[in-house]
Image: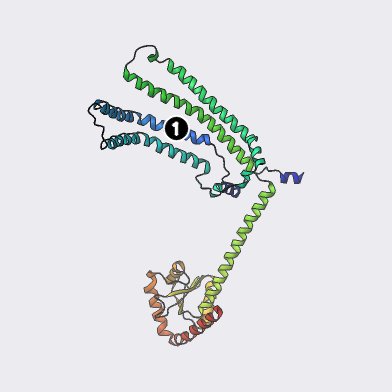
Amino acid sequence: MADQDDDSKTELPTDKKKSEAMDRGQFAKSAELQVVAMLAAALGVFSMALSAAARDVAALATLIWRDLGATQIEMGTVPQQLGEVGLLMARVLMPVVLATAAATLIAGGFQTGFRISPKALGVKLERLDIVQGFERVFSKTAAVHGVVDFLKMLGIGIVLWVSAKNLLSDPMFSAPVETAYLGDFLRRATVEFFGKLLVALGVIAALSYAYEHFKNQNEMKMTRQEVKDEHKSSEGDALTKSAMRRMGRRLLQKQMLAAVATADVVVTNPTHYAVALKYERGKDSAPVVLAKGENRFAMRIKALAAEHGVPIVENKPVARMLYGVGTVGESIPDQLYQAVAGILAFVYRTHRLYFHELKMRRAVAEGAALRRVA
Protein backbone atom coordinates (compact mmCIF):
# COMPACT_ATOMS: atom_id res chain seq x y z
CA MET A 1 0.00 0.00 0.00
CA ALA A 2 2.87 2.36 0.80
CA ASP A 3 4.43 1.72 -2.64
CA GLN A 4 1.13 2.49 -4.36
CA ASP A 5 0.80 5.75 -2.44
CA ASP A 6 4.32 6.76 -3.46
CA ASP A 7 3.67 5.93 -7.14
CA SER A 8 0.37 7.86 -7.41
CA LYS A 9 0.61 11.51 -8.41
CA THR A 10 -1.28 13.20 -5.62
CA GLU A 11 1.02 16.11 -4.73
CA LEU A 12 0.71 19.61 -6.16
CA PRO A 13 3.61 20.63 -8.43
CA THR A 14 6.48 22.51 -6.84
CA ASP A 15 7.66 25.92 -8.03
CA LYS A 16 10.61 24.28 -9.79
CA LYS A 17 8.29 21.86 -11.59
CA LYS A 18 6.04 24.74 -12.70
CA SER A 19 9.03 26.77 -13.92
CA GLU A 20 10.39 23.85 -15.96
CA ALA A 21 6.92 23.24 -17.43
CA MET A 22 6.64 26.90 -18.44
CA ASP A 23 10.06 26.70 -20.14
CA ARG A 24 8.81 23.70 -22.14
CA GLY A 25 5.67 25.56 -23.14
CA GLN A 26 3.42 23.42 -20.90
CA PHE A 27 0.85 25.78 -19.46
CA ALA A 28 -2.89 26.33 -19.57
CA LYS A 29 -3.76 28.01 -22.85
CA SER A 30 -7.04 28.72 -24.59
CA ALA A 31 -7.30 30.19 -28.08
CA GLU A 32 -10.83 31.33 -27.25
CA LEU A 33 -9.44 33.69 -24.60
CA GLN A 34 -7.39 35.54 -27.21
CA VAL A 35 -10.37 35.71 -29.57
CA VAL A 36 -12.47 37.28 -26.82
CA ALA A 37 -9.70 39.79 -26.03
CA MET A 38 -9.43 40.75 -29.70
CA LEU A 39 -13.20 41.10 -30.03
CA ALA A 40 -13.44 43.19 -26.85
CA ALA A 41 -10.65 45.52 -28.02
CA ALA A 42 -12.16 45.90 -31.48
CA LEU A 43 -15.63 46.57 -30.06
CA GLY A 44 -14.27 49.12 -27.59
CA VAL A 45 -12.35 51.07 -30.22
CA PHE A 46 -15.23 50.71 -32.69
CA SER A 47 -17.77 52.13 -30.24
CA MET A 48 -15.55 55.08 -29.30
CA ALA A 49 -14.15 56.00 -32.72
CA LEU A 50 -17.12 55.17 -34.96
CA SER A 51 -18.59 58.67 -35.00
CA ALA A 52 -15.30 60.32 -35.96
CA ALA A 53 -14.57 57.65 -38.58
CA ALA A 54 -18.06 58.03 -40.06
CA ARG A 55 -17.58 61.81 -40.33
CA ASP A 56 -14.22 61.37 -42.09
CA VAL A 57 -15.62 58.84 -44.55
CA ALA A 58 -18.70 61.01 -45.19
CA ALA A 59 -16.54 64.08 -45.80
CA LEU A 60 -14.35 62.22 -48.29
CA ALA A 61 -17.38 60.68 -50.03
CA THR A 62 -19.03 64.11 -50.29
CA LEU A 63 -15.86 65.60 -51.74
CA ILE A 64 -15.50 62.81 -54.30
CA TRP A 65 -19.11 62.78 -55.48
CA ARG A 66 -19.46 66.56 -55.47
CA ASP A 67 -16.47 67.08 -57.74
CA LEU A 68 -16.82 63.82 -59.67
CA GLY A 69 -17.86 65.50 -62.89
CA ALA A 70 -14.99 67.97 -62.84
CA THR A 71 -12.32 65.55 -61.65
CA GLN A 72 -9.57 64.88 -64.17
CA ILE A 73 -8.45 61.23 -64.24
CA GLU A 74 -4.81 61.50 -65.21
CA MET A 75 -1.62 59.60 -64.50
CA GLY A 76 -0.40 62.42 -62.29
CA THR A 77 -3.57 62.77 -60.19
CA VAL A 78 -4.49 59.11 -59.62
CA PRO A 79 -1.67 58.37 -57.11
CA GLN A 80 -2.60 61.44 -55.08
CA GLN A 81 -6.29 60.53 -55.03
CA LEU A 82 -5.58 56.91 -54.09
CA GLY A 83 -3.16 58.13 -51.43
CA GLU A 84 -5.87 60.26 -49.80
CA VAL A 85 -8.23 57.28 -49.73
CA GLY A 86 -5.47 55.05 -48.34
CA LEU A 87 -4.59 57.55 -45.59
CA LEU A 88 -8.24 57.80 -44.61
CA MET A 89 -8.65 54.02 -44.42
CA ALA A 90 -5.43 53.74 -42.41
CA ARG A 91 -6.65 56.43 -40.00
CA VAL A 92 -9.96 54.60 -39.58
CA LEU A 93 -8.59 51.05 -39.28
CA MET A 94 -5.26 51.64 -37.48
CA PRO A 95 -6.76 52.10 -33.98
CA VAL A 96 -8.66 48.81 -34.36
CA VAL A 97 -5.57 46.97 -35.62
CA LEU A 98 -3.35 48.29 -32.84
CA ALA A 99 -5.95 47.59 -30.15
CA THR A 100 -6.54 44.01 -31.30
CA ALA A 101 -2.78 43.35 -31.55
CA ALA A 102 -2.22 44.68 -28.02
CA ALA A 103 -5.17 42.67 -26.68
CA THR A 104 -3.78 39.50 -28.29
CA LEU A 105 -0.36 40.04 -26.70
CA ILE A 106 -1.89 40.75 -23.29
CA ALA A 107 -4.16 37.69 -23.45
CA GLY A 108 -1.21 35.52 -24.49
CA GLY A 109 0.96 36.99 -21.74
CA PHE A 110 -1.77 36.32 -19.19
CA GLN A 111 -1.70 32.63 -20.10
CA THR A 112 2.10 32.33 -20.24
CA GLY A 113 2.78 34.48 -17.19
CA PHE A 114 4.47 36.97 -19.57
CA ARG A 115 7.39 34.58 -19.98
CA ILE A 116 9.18 33.52 -23.15
CA SER A 117 9.43 29.74 -23.57
CA PRO A 118 12.17 29.13 -26.18
CA LYS A 119 11.99 25.34 -25.75
CA ALA A 120 8.36 25.41 -26.87
CA LEU A 121 9.46 26.75 -30.26
CA GLY A 122 11.71 23.79 -31.02
CA VAL A 123 10.80 20.91 -33.32
CA LYS A 124 9.23 18.03 -31.40
CA LEU A 125 9.85 14.78 -33.28
CA GLU A 126 7.29 12.90 -31.21
CA ARG A 127 4.55 14.90 -32.96
CA LEU A 128 5.48 13.05 -36.17
CA ASP A 129 4.61 9.71 -34.57
CA ILE A 130 1.50 8.38 -36.35
CA VAL A 131 0.35 6.30 -33.35
CA GLN A 132 0.56 9.26 -31.01
CA GLY A 133 -1.18 11.35 -33.63
CA PHE A 134 -4.18 8.97 -33.65
CA GLU A 135 -4.17 8.97 -29.85
CA ARG A 136 -4.32 12.77 -29.80
CA VAL A 137 -7.16 12.83 -32.35
CA PHE A 138 -9.30 10.41 -30.33
CA SER A 139 -8.23 11.57 -26.87
CA LYS A 140 -10.29 13.14 -24.13
CA THR A 141 -8.69 16.52 -24.85
CA ALA A 142 -9.77 16.35 -28.49
CA ALA A 143 -13.31 15.53 -27.38
CA VAL A 144 -13.35 18.54 -25.05
CA HIS A 145 -12.09 20.78 -27.85
CA GLY A 146 -14.86 19.42 -30.07
CA VAL A 147 -17.43 20.31 -27.43
CA VAL A 148 -15.94 23.82 -27.15
CA ASP A 149 -16.14 24.27 -30.93
CA PHE A 150 -19.77 23.10 -30.90
CA LEU A 151 -20.56 25.56 -28.10
CA LYS A 152 -18.97 28.35 -30.10
CA MET A 153 -21.12 27.55 -33.13
CA LEU A 154 -24.17 27.24 -30.93
CA GLY A 155 -23.41 30.55 -29.21
CA ILE A 156 -22.92 32.38 -32.50
CA GLY A 157 -26.16 30.88 -33.84
CA ILE A 158 -28.15 31.94 -30.76
CA VAL A 159 -26.68 35.46 -30.87
CA LEU A 160 -27.56 35.79 -34.55
CA TRP A 161 -31.12 34.58 -33.94
CA VAL A 162 -31.74 36.83 -30.92
CA SER A 163 -30.16 39.87 -32.60
CA ALA A 164 -32.12 39.35 -35.81
CA LYS A 165 -35.35 38.94 -33.85
CA ASN A 166 -34.76 42.18 -31.94
CA LEU A 167 -33.66 44.14 -34.99
CA LEU A 168 -36.65 43.06 -37.10
CA SER A 169 -38.92 44.73 -34.57
CA ASP A 170 -37.28 48.09 -35.28
CA PRO A 171 -39.64 50.79 -36.69
CA MET A 172 -37.62 51.07 -39.91
CA PHE A 173 -39.04 47.75 -41.06
CA SER A 174 -42.64 48.87 -40.56
CA ALA A 175 -42.70 52.61 -41.26
CA PRO A 176 -40.86 55.23 -43.35
CA VAL A 177 -37.76 56.66 -41.63
CA GLU A 178 -35.22 59.35 -42.43
CA THR A 179 -32.01 58.47 -44.27
CA ALA A 180 -29.90 59.45 -41.23
CA TYR A 181 -31.77 56.87 -39.17
CA LEU A 182 -30.29 54.09 -41.32
CA GLY A 183 -26.75 54.96 -40.19
CA ASP A 184 -27.82 55.00 -36.54
CA PHE A 185 -29.61 51.67 -37.01
CA LEU A 186 -26.49 50.04 -38.52
CA ARG A 187 -24.37 51.32 -35.66
CA ARG A 188 -26.78 50.02 -33.00
CA ALA A 189 -27.15 46.69 -34.80
CA THR A 190 -23.39 46.20 -35.02
CA VAL A 191 -22.74 47.09 -31.39
CA GLU A 192 -25.62 44.93 -30.17
CA PHE A 193 -24.56 41.90 -32.20
CA PHE A 194 -20.89 42.02 -31.27
CA GLY A 195 -21.71 42.84 -27.65
CA LYS A 196 -23.87 39.73 -27.29
CA LEU A 197 -21.30 37.68 -29.21
CA LEU A 198 -18.61 38.91 -26.80
CA VAL A 199 -20.64 37.78 -23.79
CA ALA A 200 -21.34 34.35 -25.28
CA LEU A 201 -17.73 33.74 -26.33
CA GLY A 202 -16.51 35.10 -22.98
CA VAL A 203 -18.44 32.42 -21.10
CA ILE A 204 -17.13 29.72 -23.46
CA ALA A 205 -13.54 31.02 -23.16
CA ALA A 206 -13.78 31.03 -19.36
CA LEU A 207 -14.99 27.42 -19.34
CA SER A 208 -12.30 26.39 -21.85
CA TYR A 209 -9.50 28.05 -19.89
CA ALA A 210 -10.75 26.61 -16.60
CA TYR A 211 -10.64 23.12 -18.12
CA GLU A 212 -7.14 23.68 -19.58
CA HIS A 213 -5.88 24.95 -16.22
CA PHE A 214 -7.40 21.95 -14.40
CA LYS A 215 -5.93 19.52 -16.95
CA ASN A 216 -2.50 21.15 -16.81
CA GLN A 217 -2.43 21.05 -13.00
CA ASN A 218 -3.33 17.35 -13.04
CA GLU A 219 -0.65 16.58 -15.62
CA MET A 220 2.00 18.35 -13.53
CA LYS A 221 1.11 16.64 -10.26
CA MET A 222 3.99 14.76 -8.64
CA THR A 223 4.38 11.64 -6.58
CA ARG A 224 5.49 11.95 -2.98
CA GLN A 225 8.82 10.39 -3.92
CA GLU A 226 9.39 13.01 -6.64
CA VAL A 227 8.71 15.79 -4.13
CA LYS A 228 11.14 14.21 -1.64
CA ASP A 229 13.84 13.78 -4.32
CA GLU A 230 13.47 17.38 -5.48
CA HIS A 231 13.61 18.63 -1.89
CA LYS A 232 16.78 16.62 -1.26
CA SER A 233 18.31 17.92 -4.48
CA SER A 234 17.60 21.54 -3.57
CA GLU A 235 18.95 20.99 -0.06
CA GLY A 236 22.07 19.43 -1.56
CA ASP A 237 22.56 22.43 -3.81
CA ALA A 238 22.17 24.76 -0.84
CA LEU A 239 24.65 22.74 1.23
CA THR A 240 27.14 22.72 -1.65
CA LYS A 241 26.87 26.46 -2.11
CA SER A 242 27.24 27.02 1.62
CA ALA A 243 30.34 24.80 1.72
CA MET A 244 31.82 26.68 -1.24
CA ARG A 245 31.18 30.02 0.49
CA ARG A 246 32.88 28.75 3.66
CA MET A 247 35.84 27.48 1.64
CA GLY A 248 36.08 30.84 -0.13
CA ARG A 249 36.05 32.70 3.20
CA ARG A 250 38.76 30.43 4.61
CA LEU A 251 40.91 30.90 1.50
CA LEU A 252 40.48 34.67 1.66
CA GLN A 253 41.34 34.70 5.36
CA LYS A 254 44.45 32.61 4.68
CA GLN A 255 45.56 35.02 1.96
CA MET A 256 44.90 38.02 4.21
CA LEU A 257 46.89 36.55 7.09
CA ALA A 258 49.80 35.77 4.72
CA ALA A 259 49.80 39.40 3.55
CA VAL A 260 49.94 40.91 7.05
CA ALA A 261 53.73 40.34 7.25
CA THR A 262 54.29 42.77 4.35
CA ALA A 263 51.94 45.54 5.60
CA ASP A 264 53.05 49.08 6.35
CA VAL A 265 50.73 49.43 9.31
CA VAL A 266 47.82 47.76 11.11
CA VAL A 267 45.12 50.18 12.27
CA THR A 268 43.06 48.89 15.24
CA ASN A 269 39.94 49.78 17.23
CA PRO A 270 41.76 48.41 19.47
CA THR A 271 39.98 45.07 20.06
CA HIS A 272 37.01 44.95 17.69
CA TYR A 273 38.59 45.81 14.32
CA ALA A 274 41.99 45.51 12.67
CA VAL A 275 42.92 46.62 9.14
CA ALA A 276 46.32 46.03 7.51
CA LEU A 277 47.47 48.59 4.90
CA LYS A 278 50.36 48.86 2.46
CA TYR A 279 51.62 51.64 0.24
CA GLU A 280 54.47 51.31 -2.24
CA ARG A 281 55.54 54.55 -3.90
CA GLY A 282 55.62 54.33 -7.69
CA LYS A 283 53.45 51.20 -7.61
CA ASP A 284 50.30 52.07 -5.64
CA SER A 285 48.25 55.15 -6.44
CA ALA A 286 46.83 55.07 -2.89
CA PRO A 287 47.15 52.87 0.23
CA VAL A 288 45.75 49.36 -0.35
CA VAL A 289 43.82 47.20 2.12
CA LEU A 290 45.73 43.93 2.60
CA ALA A 291 43.56 42.41 5.33
CA LYS A 292 40.70 43.32 7.62
CA GLY A 293 38.81 41.55 10.38
CA GLU A 294 36.72 41.92 13.50
CA ASN A 295 36.78 40.33 16.94
CA ARG A 296 38.71 37.03 16.82
CA PHE A 297 40.05 37.49 13.32
CA ALA A 298 41.14 41.02 14.24
CA MET A 299 43.09 39.53 17.17
CA ARG A 300 44.81 37.08 14.79
CA ILE A 301 45.81 39.96 12.49
CA LYS A 302 47.24 41.89 15.45
CA ALA A 303 49.11 38.82 16.70
CA LEU A 304 50.72 38.24 13.29
CA ALA A 305 51.58 41.92 13.01
CA ALA A 306 53.29 41.84 16.40
CA GLU A 307 55.14 38.64 15.44
CA HIS A 308 56.59 40.25 12.29
CA GLY A 309 57.17 43.67 13.81
CA VAL A 310 54.48 45.44 11.76
CA PRO A 311 53.61 48.82 13.32
CA ILE A 312 50.23 48.81 15.08
CA VAL A 313 48.38 52.12 15.47
CA GLU A 314 45.23 52.51 17.53
CA ASN A 315 42.72 54.84 15.89
CA LYS A 316 39.12 53.87 16.60
CA PRO A 317 37.20 56.00 14.04
CA VAL A 318 39.65 55.31 11.19
CA ALA A 319 39.75 51.57 11.94
CA ARG A 320 35.96 51.42 12.03
CA MET A 321 35.67 53.32 8.72
CA LEU A 322 38.35 51.23 7.02
CA TYR A 323 36.63 48.01 8.05
CA GLY A 324 33.20 49.27 6.96
CA VAL A 325 33.99 50.74 3.55
CA GLY A 326 37.38 49.26 2.64
CA THR A 327 37.70 46.28 0.25
CA VAL A 328 40.54 43.77 0.49
CA GLY A 329 42.91 44.12 -2.47
CA GLU A 330 41.66 47.60 -3.41
CA SER A 331 42.66 51.17 -2.60
CA ILE A 332 41.10 52.93 0.38
CA PRO A 333 38.18 55.32 -0.30
CA ASP A 334 39.01 58.96 -1.10
CA GLN A 335 37.52 60.29 2.11
CA LEU A 336 40.13 58.40 4.18
CA TYR A 337 43.23 59.62 2.30
CA GLN A 338 44.07 62.40 4.74
CA ALA A 339 43.57 60.34 7.90
CA VAL A 340 45.58 57.37 6.57
CA ALA A 341 48.31 59.69 5.26
CA GLY A 342 48.78 61.04 8.79
CA ILE A 343 49.02 57.49 10.21
CA LEU A 344 51.59 56.44 7.57
CA ALA A 345 53.66 59.59 8.12
CA PHE A 346 53.76 58.77 11.83
CA VAL A 347 54.92 55.15 11.37
CA TYR A 348 57.48 56.17 8.71
CA ARG A 349 59.11 58.48 11.28
CA THR A 350 58.97 56.06 14.22
CA HIS A 351 59.76 52.71 12.53
CA ARG A 352 62.55 53.48 10.02
CA LEU A 353 64.37 50.20 10.63
CA TYR A 354 61.19 48.20 9.94
CA PHE A 355 60.65 49.93 6.58
CA HIS A 356 64.27 49.37 5.65
CA GLU A 357 63.73 45.62 6.20
CA LEU A 358 60.25 45.67 4.57
CA LYS A 359 61.67 46.15 1.07
CA MET A 360 63.62 42.91 1.35
CA ARG A 361 60.63 41.11 2.92
CA ARG A 362 58.35 42.14 0.05
CA ALA A 363 60.92 41.08 -2.53
CA VAL A 364 61.16 37.63 -0.91
CA ALA A 365 57.33 37.32 -0.77
CA GLU A 366 56.98 38.30 -4.47
CA GLY A 367 59.67 35.79 -5.46
CA ALA A 368 57.90 33.02 -3.55
CA ALA A 369 54.61 33.95 -5.23
CA LEU A 370 56.22 33.79 -8.68
CA ARG A 371 57.70 30.35 -7.94
CA ARG A 372 54.26 29.07 -6.85
CA VAL A 373 52.72 30.31 -10.10
CA ALA A 374 55.50 28.74 -12.17
In the picture, residue 254 is in which quadrant?
Answer: bottom right
Asked if residue 66 can be seen in this view, the reply is yes
Q: Count every numbered label the image shows and give the total.
A: 1
Asked if residue 296 can be seen in this view, the reply is no
Tell me if residue 157 comes above or below residue 2 in the rendering: above
- From the viewer's perspective, is 199 left or right of 9? left
Q: How is the image coloured?
A: rainbow
Tell me if residue 63 comes above or below residue 349 in the rendering: above
In the picture, residue 68 is in which quadrant?
Answer: top left
Name the residue furthest front. Answer: 75
Q: Residue at x 59, y 31 (%)?
A: 146
Q: Amino acid at mark 1?
A: Ala
Q: Which residue is mark 1?
A: 40
Percent x, y of residue 145: 59, 33
Name the residue furthest left. Answer: 70
Q: Residue at x 42, y 80 (%)?
A: 280
- From the viewer's perspective, is 10 left or right of 91? right
Pick the front one: 52 or 221: 52
Q: Residue at x 50, y 81 (%)?
A: 366
Pick the front one: 293 or 358: 358
Tell me if residue 305 comes above or below residue 196 in the rendering: below
Q: Quadrant of the N terminus?
A: top right
Name the residue furthest top. Answer: 175
In the picture, residue 66 is in which quadrant?
Answer: top left
Q: Quadrant of the C terminus?
A: bottom right
Tag 1: Cα neighbours inside 10 Å, few (<14), some, or many (≥20)? many
Q: Secondary structure at mark 1?
A: helix
Pick the front one: 156 or 11: 156
Percent x, y of residue 271: 50, 72
Pick the front one: 58 or 101: 58
